Image (cartoon, rainbow, N blue to C red):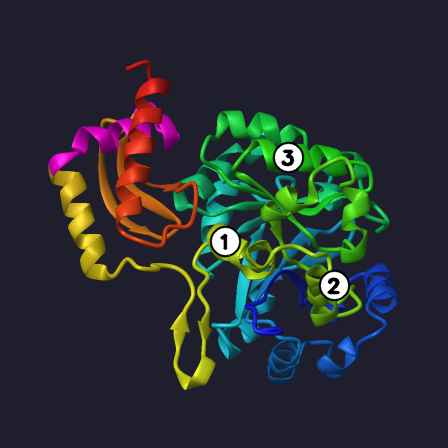
Amino acid sequence: MIDGRPLIDAHVHTARLPTLPPAWRRWAEEFGSSHPWQDLYDADGALVPEKVDAYFEDEGVDIALLLCEYSPKTTGTQPIEDLQPLLKHNPRRFKPIANVNPHLHYPIDAEVARQLEFGAAALKLHPVHGGFSVADPDLYPAYQVCRDAGVPVVVHCGTSSFPGSANRYADPTPIDDVLRLFPGLTFVLAHGGRGWWYDAAAFLALSREEVWIELSGLPPHRLPEYYARHDLRRLARTFIFGTDWPGVPGIARNARAIAALGLDEETLGLVLGGNALRVYKGLSLQLSPGGKDRSMTGPGPFTEDVVRQITRHMNDDHAADCLTICRALGGRPGATAARMTGLDAGGIEFAVSDGGVEHPVRIPFTERLTERPQVRREVVRMAEEARAALGG
C-alpha cells in the first residue's frame, strides 16, 4: 500500500539484461536514473528475486504485472519463462502478462493458450515493436482465446524511440474495428495514446466500456495537458496505474503524483488499484491492517455457497436466458446451449456449446458488485439487452 491505498503497477519490465539490446539499457538509465535499478541485478544480468521483492515492497506496490516480449527487430526476445524466478518467489505480488507476435507465433492461439498457463493476467501486443497492425486477421484466433478466457488484451498505444520501431502502428483507432468483431473483449491502451493519439485513446475509453487507459510512460503532472480536450475527472475513471519500470523516476513518486491531481478519493482508488482488479484476470489483494487479512477482490461478497445458489437458480430456472445472453453478449451467436458456471464481483461465467465444442465465456458486469441483489439487476439487464440485440 501507499499512503493507505492499495497500489498495482500494471506495466513492469523485469527482463534479463543479456536478452536486451544496448538501446534498452540506455533508455532505462536515462529515464530511471533517479533510482538504483541496476543494483537489483546479479553479475550475470538476472534480477535477484529477494532484492526485487523488497524493492517493490518499499515502493508500496501490492501487485506488479510483469511483461515478456517477443520483438527481435527492436527490443529483443524476453520469453515468459524468464519471469519464473520472480513468479515463484512471491506469487502474490508478481503476476505475468503474456505476449505474442503474429510474425513469430503460429498457430497463435496455441501460443496464447500456452502462455496463459503461466497464470497470465492479460495478453500484451506490441504492434510498434513487432511491426504489425492490431487489426491484423492473423491475431483473430488470439482474440478469440482471450475473450473466451476472460483475459484482457493490452496494446502498446504510443510512440517508441527504439530503433526498428514502426510508430504508425501505435494508433489505437483500429481497435474499434476489432471490438465490433469480438464483442465482450477488453482492451487496455498502454501509454494512453502517447505522442499523436491522446484524443483517440480518450474517445475510445469514454465511448466503450471495454476500453481502458493505462498510464505507463506518462508523467502524471502532464495528464491534464495530454487530455486537455476531455473532462479529466470523468476520463480518470478509465485510468489504470502503470509505470514502465525501470524507465520511470519512481513508482511511489508517480503514484503520489497521481494523488496530487486532485481526483476524488473514490476515483483515485480506482486509478491506483481498483480498476486493475476489475480488468486483469485473477488479481487479488491480501492486505493486513491491524494484523487481520482483508481480501480486496475477486469474489467480493459472493462466497462459494452464494455462487452455488445463484448458479443452480440460473441453470434450473433461466436456462433460456443464459443461452440468449451468451449468443448476443458473449460472442457466440451459433451457441446451442449455455450453462452458468460461476461469478465474482466483476462478471458472470458460462460454459457454452457451439459447433459441437464447449467454450468458456465470461461477461463483465457494468460495475463491480458489492451485494447479492445487484446480481439480479445485472442479469436482468443482460437478458433485456440480449433479447433486443437478437430482435426478440
Mark 3 or mark 1: which comes first in sequence? Answer: 3
Residue occupying the point 27% across, 26% down: 324
Camera-near label (3 vs 1) is 1
Image position, residue 214 (x, y; %): 65, 50
Amino acid type, mark 3: Val
Residue occupying the point 19% across, 48% down: 310
- Picture quarter with the N terminus: bottom right
- What span is in magenta? 317-334
Alpha carbon separation for disc pair 2 and 3: 31 Å
Amino acid type, mark 2: Ala
Q: Which residue is mark 3?
A: 134
**Quick one: label 2, few (<14), some, or many (20+) residues within 10 Å?**
some
Dot 3 falls on a residue whose secondary structure is: loop
Camera-near label (2 vs 3) is 2
Q: Which residue is mark 2?
A: 257
Task: Answer with the quarter of the image where residue 5 lies.
Answer: bottom right
Image position, residue 51 (x, y; %): 65, 84
The magenta stretch spans residue 289: no
Residue occupying the point 67% across, 68% down: 14
